[in-house]
Amino acid sequence: METRDFAYFVVRPRVIEDLIQPHLFEQEREYRIVKTIELGKMDYENFITDMLADRQFIEDNADLCSRDEVWQCLLIRQHRCSDGILVMPEDGCYVGWAAYYAD
């Protein structure tokens, strides 16, 4: 997927509500989605209620990501849903930075 856009990334969020907050446009970063990972309803709910837990699906794809001028990140979403979470892994297996993604 070659999507490039801007989003407000939060460092080490625990829950999805941490991502949905007022911010200035200048605080947003340019990003590109390098891979979309779709989870089942229960797995996605588990993910958005504890984003700091180690996740195998993040570890398996962390090498695709980078924090260059344009952040190369993962999009994690529930199967058949358009919104989700943009993830920049840290230490390979958990969310270091994340942003809410509304398609």
Image (spheres, grey):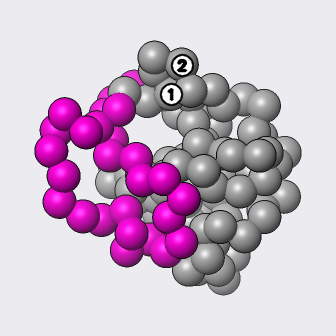
Task: Return the residue at label 1.
Answer: 71
Give how far apart the Cα atoms at labels 2 and 1 are.
5 Å
Q: Residue at x 77, y 46 (%)?
A: 91
Mark 2 in CB contact with mark 1 (< 8 angstroms): yes
Q: Residue at x 47, y 58 (%)?
A: 84
Q: Residue 32: percent from the left, percent from the top?
A: 48, 28
Mark 1 is on which residue type?
Trp
Judged left or right of residue 39, residue 14 is left
- In the rendered image, is residue 10 in sight? yes
- In the rendered image, is residue 40 in sight? no
Residue 14: in magenta span: yes
> Which corner quadrant of the image does residue 40 belong to?
bottom right
> Which corner quadrant of the image does residue 3 belong to?
top left
- Element on which disc 1 rests: strand
Quadrant placement of the N terminus: top right
Q: Is residue 30 above or below residue 25?
A: above
Query: Which range is magenta?
Result: 1-29
Query: In the drawing, what numbered circle is on residue 68?
Result: 2
